[in-house]
Image (tube, grey):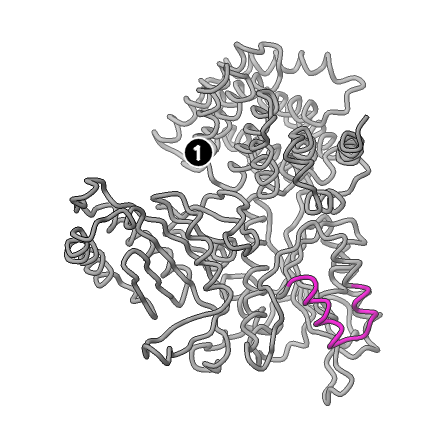
């Protein structure tokens, strides 16, 4: 056996072992050797099996996306990876992209029951979104058709059978639903002894619910939920099915919710530990033990949870420790990359906090970095901390939306009104701006136990007037490129400017939101906006203007298309000394420029940062579908990207 084969076997054993934790799986993935993984798609298949029912749809899609590109990916693994990729896309809300992926699979391979079941699930999801009316009925009929085709291929498979029964019930065909549910019950009862598959128990529960045996259904759901562990996507799927059936029966749709024990999604903000020379103490080192105990009590009371936080010395790290020690999952959002953040801790705190950070970072299930390189407080200001607060909130809102669970907040806060951008009070004002309150307030003096009450109302800082213009500000950046421009002949260019660009300019001038600055280099466009909402709506209008443009170059006779990229983050507002024009520059301007070349022709791509801020702003005027984790040009790292489209 070769050394490489031994490594692959060892990796497979580690991935497949139930004792391998989620943060250990993350380490395996992030430290992988592409020379090995790109030649062994079975590694991707094994990892997706471990992850697919966890609450990590973006990560699952990234694994499947890479696995499908392996040169020796056989048809069986390719099909399975595509199916799981489509399911993960569906969980992010990208239903249309998931349907296209599965339909292309049907065209490529012989039909499989699992593919039909997934298409049925997507149609059922669309019906659930439609709520009522003819559109909902059409989606349910399509779902019934797909599940029925799966049953024909695998008549003894309880999964397509139970879904056929449920969709029949939702369509009002209660007799048919009862007959099929009875068949499913008999099928499951034959297999249930000695079988610890929680889907078998959940299927039996759903069948009993369709037959009107709510108490029996609750018992089976509870037994299934106890076996699920942290596979929260599976738990959410069970609960969603139960809610739809109960609603169709005229019962309280939430009457079985208590048996599922869904996790809360929790965001945290808290004061840093006081510096030794702080004049008025707020969180003194002497209070660490008491504060840690109170945070642990709050976390224990809210377990299970999926927690989002940063990791500054003080409240952040104490909260992160409590989350991990109680067996919950932690998602970290850091202002800088790991190396620079460790340097930042060392500069401001003692080695004890650094050791705490290393322990937490090694066990977090994901780490998002808000910016790269070192941070200079006096030059860049505190916008990065406001940005981190918004990323934490936006990513947490994504998660709570996927799982259809509550989003709640904990703060270590002295309840003094806000004074600085990105501080705890400023973060609480941000929470309040989208309708959240502070569910638990912990006193940083350690004097009192956690309290649950209405927090005082705070006004958000007026950043336009209070922020030093020499410091960074959060802006949304758009880069666009006209595809095919380089193929134009010189004699096309006057018409290009007089016709094509003039039409674009007229559209821009009619738009409600004027860009803060704009520039054009013939085929390239650059715009900056105050908010992601303005930038997203502008991008859609810009898209329409180009697509409606009828001018054809004489040299090629082909219509010109575009690529548009959007990003958001802290940048400097500066006056260009050469041109005299206003400009916005910084790492996040560069990131938007790096995303643009990888955009597919005719599409609008946005970064994860842009998507998170759009989630905070609760925008419903455009939609975002996940595309994947993509390498950026010029060694600029990787980025999760989304397609921006009409809602």
Dominant SS type (magenta): helix
Residue density around tag 1, few if under 14, some if 14–19, many if 20 or more, within 10 Å: some
Q: Is residue 293 left or right of residue 451?
A: right
Q: Is residue 252 magenta?
A: no
Q: Is residue 422 left or right of residue 204?
A: left
Q: Is residue 99 above or below residue 504?
A: above
Q: Is residue 339 magenta?
A: yes
Residue 570 image point, x, y percent: 50, 69
Q: What segment carries the magenta color?
A: 337-356
Residue 247 image point, x, y percent: 51, 33
Instruction: Please identify the quadrant where the N terminus is shown.
Output: top right
Q: Is residue 5 above or below residue 463?
A: above
Q: Does residue 647 show up?
A: no
Residue at 40 percent across and 51 percent down: it is 620
Q: Is residue 206 above or below residue 329?
A: above
Query: What residue is shown with label 1?
Result: 126
Q: Quadrant of residue 211?
A: top right
Instruction: Please identify the quadrant where the C terminus is shown.
Output: top left
Q: Quadrant of residue 385?
A: bottom right
| Secondary structure category for the residue under label 1 | helix
Residue 287 image point, x, y percent: 81, 75
Nearer-the-camera pick, 560 or 605:
560
Q: Quadrant of residue 342?
A: bottom right
Residue 612 image point, x, y percent: 51, 56
Q: Does residue 316 show up?
A: yes
Residue at 60 percent across and 50 percent down: it is 406
Nearer-the-camera pick, 267 or 297:
267
Number of numbered discs on residues: 1
Residue at 19 percent across and 43 percent down: it is 555
């Amino acid at each position: 056996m070769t050394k490489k084969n031994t490594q692959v076997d060892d990796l497979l054993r580690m991935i497949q072992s139930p004792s391998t934790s989620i943060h250990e799986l993350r380490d395996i993935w992030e430290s992988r050797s592409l020379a090995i993984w790109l030649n062994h798609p079975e590694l991707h298949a094994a990892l997706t099996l471990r992850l697919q029912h966890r609450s990590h749809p973006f990560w699952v899609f990234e694994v499947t996306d890479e696995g499908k590109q392996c040169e020796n990916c056989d048809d069986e693994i390719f099909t399975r990876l595509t199916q799981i990729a489509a399911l993960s896309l569906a969980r992010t809300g990208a239903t249309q992209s998931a349907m296209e992926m599965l339909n292309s699979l049907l065209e490529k391979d012989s039909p499989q029951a699992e593919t039909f079941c997934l298409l049925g699930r997507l149609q059922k999801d669309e019906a659930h979104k439609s709520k009522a009316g003819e559109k909902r009925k059409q989606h349910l009929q399509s779902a019934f058709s797909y599940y029925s085709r799966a049953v024909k291929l695998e008549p003894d498979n309880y999964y397509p059978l139970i879904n056929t029964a449920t969709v029949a019930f939702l369509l009002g065909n209660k007799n048919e639903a009862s007959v099929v549910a009875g068949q499913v019950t008999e099928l499951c009862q034959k297999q249930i002894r000695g079988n610890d598959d929680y889907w078998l128990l959940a299927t039996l529960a759903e069948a009993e619910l369709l037959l009107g045996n709510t108490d029996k259904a609750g018992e089976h759901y509870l037994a299934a939920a106890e076996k699920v562990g942290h596979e929260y996507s599976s738990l959410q799927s069970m609960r969603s099915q139960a809610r739809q059936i109960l609603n169709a029966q005229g019962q309280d749709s939430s009457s079985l919710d208590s048996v599922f024990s869904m996790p809360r999604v929790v965001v945290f903000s808290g004061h840093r530990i006081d510096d030794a020379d702080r004049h008025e103490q707020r969180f003194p080192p002497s209070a660490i033990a008491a504060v840690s105990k109170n945070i642990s009590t709050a976390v224990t009371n809210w377990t299970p949870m999926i927690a989002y936080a940063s990791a500054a010395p003080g409240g952040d790290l104490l909260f992160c420790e409590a989350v991990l020690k109680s067996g919950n999952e932690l998602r970290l959002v850091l202002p800088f990359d790991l190396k620079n953040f460790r340097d930042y801790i060392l500069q401001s705190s003692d080695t004890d906090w650094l050791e705490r950070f290393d322990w937490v970072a090694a066990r977090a299930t994901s780490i998002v970095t808000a910016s790269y390189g070192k941070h200079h407080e006096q030059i860049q200001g505190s916008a990065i901390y406001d940005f981190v607060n918004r990323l934490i909130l936006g990513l947490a809102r994504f998660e709570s939306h996927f799982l259809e669970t509550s989003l709640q907040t904990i703060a270590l806060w002295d309840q003094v009104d806000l004074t600085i951008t990105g501080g705890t009070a400023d973060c609480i004002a941000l929470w309040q701006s989208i309708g959240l309150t502070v569910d638990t307030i912990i006193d940083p003096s350690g004097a009192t136990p956690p309290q649950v009450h209405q927090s005082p109302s705070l006004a958000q800082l007026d950043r336009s007037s209070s922020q030093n213009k020499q410091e960074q500000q959060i802006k949304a950046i758009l880069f666009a490129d006209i595809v095919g421009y380089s193929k134009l002949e010189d004699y096309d260019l006057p018409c290009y400017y007089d016709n094509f660009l003039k039409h674009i300019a007229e559209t821009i001038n009619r738009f409600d939101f004027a860009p803060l600055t704009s520039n054009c280099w013939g085929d390239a466009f650059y715009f900056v906006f105050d908010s992601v909402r303005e930038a997203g709506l502008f991008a859609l209008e810009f898209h329409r203007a180009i697509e409606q443009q009828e001018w054809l170059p004489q040299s090629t006779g082909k219509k010109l298309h575009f690529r548009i990229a959007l990003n958001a983050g802290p940048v400097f507002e500066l006056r260009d000394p050469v041109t005299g024009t206003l400009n916005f520059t910084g790492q996040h301007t560069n990131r938007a420029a790096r995303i643009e070349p990888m955009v597919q022709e005719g599409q609008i791509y946005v970064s994860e940062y842009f998507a998170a801020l759009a989630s905070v702003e609760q925008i419903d005027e455009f939609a975002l579908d996940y595309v994947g984790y993509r390498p950026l040009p010029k060694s600029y790292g990787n980025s999760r990207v989304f397609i921006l489209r009409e809602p």
